Amino acid sequence: MKAEQMEQARQLLQEIYGYDSFRPGQEQVIQQVLERIDTLAVMPTGGGKSLCYQLPALLLEGVTLVISPLISLMKDQVDALRALGIKGSYINSTLARQDVTDRLNAVSAGDIDLLYVAPERLGDERLRRALMQAGLAFVAVDEAHCLSQWGHDFRPSYKEIPAWIYSFQPAPSVLALTATATPSVAEELRNAFDIAPDHSVETGFARDNLTFHVVKGADKATYIDQYVKRRQQEAGIVYTATRKEAEALQKSLQRKGVQVGLYHGGLSEEERRKNQEDFLYDECQVMVATNAFGMGINKSNVRFVIHASMPGSVEAYYQEAGRAGRDGAPAECLLLFSAQDVRTQRFFIEQSDAPQDRIEALYGMLQDMTGYCHTDGCLVENVLSYFGEQDVSACGRCGNCTREGERMDRTEDAQKVLSCVLRMRENYGKTMIAQVLTGSRNQKVLQFKLHTVSTYGLMKGTSAKIVQGFIEFLLAEQYVRLTLDEFPKVKVTPKGAEVLRGERRVEQFIEASRPAEVSDKLFEVLRACRKRLAQEEGLPPFMIFSDKTLRDMCDKQP
Ligand code: ADP
Ligand code: MG
Ligand code: ZN
């Protein structure tokens, strides 16, 4: 029976879809679904998750319910099914009342094999009755990570799904699908749907055709202009953190003569659709967008994805960056980092009215994202281990793997910072620690009597900004960690404690081309010179050199 059904599945794959073979993971998922085993499928975007529920839907009795948050894509998906001759339908808030009734009647009559609904619909009693009449084959929960508090895209309506499913007698089997799940998210999903660990199908997160870079301290607009110009006719996406930033970047690219589209939640539905289509059909080279753009969009020849600002989580980042190179050809993913990005993301969290444990989860995700930006090691290794993959080795291609320079011993500096953290009773943030170490007479330092701490001034002569940068590095490499609240305090980790005891050395990679620290230091020295010169000549400092000119001089290659 089992073998027979799989044979039928393979036949349908060829006859209906015209594909020769299954993609990794598909066969196992389909087999489990056919055996009515509750299953979690974690496969990358574009990995072919839809097929995993569409094929069994054709083979099993009754109607298959697909729960998806992507209302705007349901029509396209169902149209595509209908074009293949599959009896699909959807119900969401865009339909007129009568239309909903007609569709529910079709479900009751057994005329529908696959029904897509948004989770908000589940409360509708008529839907339940129609499904009971038709008989439920199984329930596919797409974008299942939306159920997890620990995930980056938590949606409260998803929380209701398990109870709704288990209110059926007998309960239908479940297929939960997602492209992004950290170990804790996957565990939460398995618990919610009672899925055995053995019944998780995970095909791995690695994307070997993508090359990752983190760029720090660049003037973002200029950098993006130049980068896009260099890539000439190649398609790319530039993600921003805010609508305002998207509009500014779009204008600046337009002025440079680039064909550029814009996409964010503030545009009308029509504008969004038009801009999206222009991009899909190569009418414009670059799409500047907020994270509203991209879910379910299948453009295969995106050659680069630039993040003009850091997103709030590694999951969001990897998913958005992963829209590059879907065709398997080489593509680049760049993240332009600035300290302001962290403040922006913190602001978003502060504005949210989510419950406390959700807030903590968000701060935790932000901390891991910041860690990616500051890590010294391979960027791919960083992401893959975040997703719980083991035995990953350095990619050899990313910005961190390929830069030139040397590893410097920073053990002593690390010990200074770590002991300062302890002396300050692990009760202060990065800024204060840097100020105490550099011997600042800042009002707060004096107010809290921190100038009496024994590590006060231990790193005098270095600027507070540089020390803070070094603390970021220690955070990224997990020698210290931050508490997950609005005013994060620095704490020493067990790994950091080993450094303090002299059981572990700290090495930092110092780039051969002028590293940010050197350039920052130079900037400060030149500014001091300018100030003295200005005083001697009786001129305002900016008449000698503007800050921007000084900055440029300092950032140039040696
Ligand atoms: P996901 O939901 O995992 O992001 P989709 O289900 O949208 O991915 O599939 C992405 C693309 O891959 C679709 O165009 C789909 O038709 C195609 N696809 C799926 N399975 C196969 C297969 N076995 N062989 C070839 N192409 C496939
Ligand atoms: Mg999908
Ligand atoms: Zn690497």
Image (tube, rainbow, N blue to C red):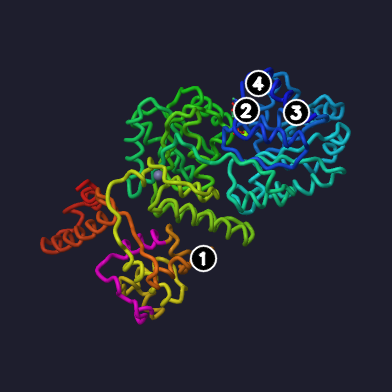
Q: Which residue is mark 4?
A: 17
Q: CA distance from mark 1 to mark 2?
A: 45 Å
Which label was assigned to residue 22?
2
Find residue 399 and report its image quarter.
top left
Tell me which residue sits at (28%, 65%) in the image.
463
Q: Which residue is mark 1?
A: 483
Instruction: Name the residue nearer the viewer: 513 or 393.
Output: 393
* Ligand 1 neighbours mark 2 (CB distance < 8 Å): yes
Give x and y (percent) for residue 323. 50, 35
- Mark 3 packing: few (<14 Cα in 10 Å), some, or many (20+)? few
Label 2 vs label 4, nearer the camera:
2
The quarter of the picture showing ligand 1: top right
Q: CA distance from mark 2 to mark 4?
A: 11 Å
Q: Which residue is mark 3?
A: 3
Tell me which numbered mark, 4 or 1, is placed earlier along the sequence.
4
Q: 55 left or right of 212?
A: right
Give x and y (percent) for residue 446. 36, 78
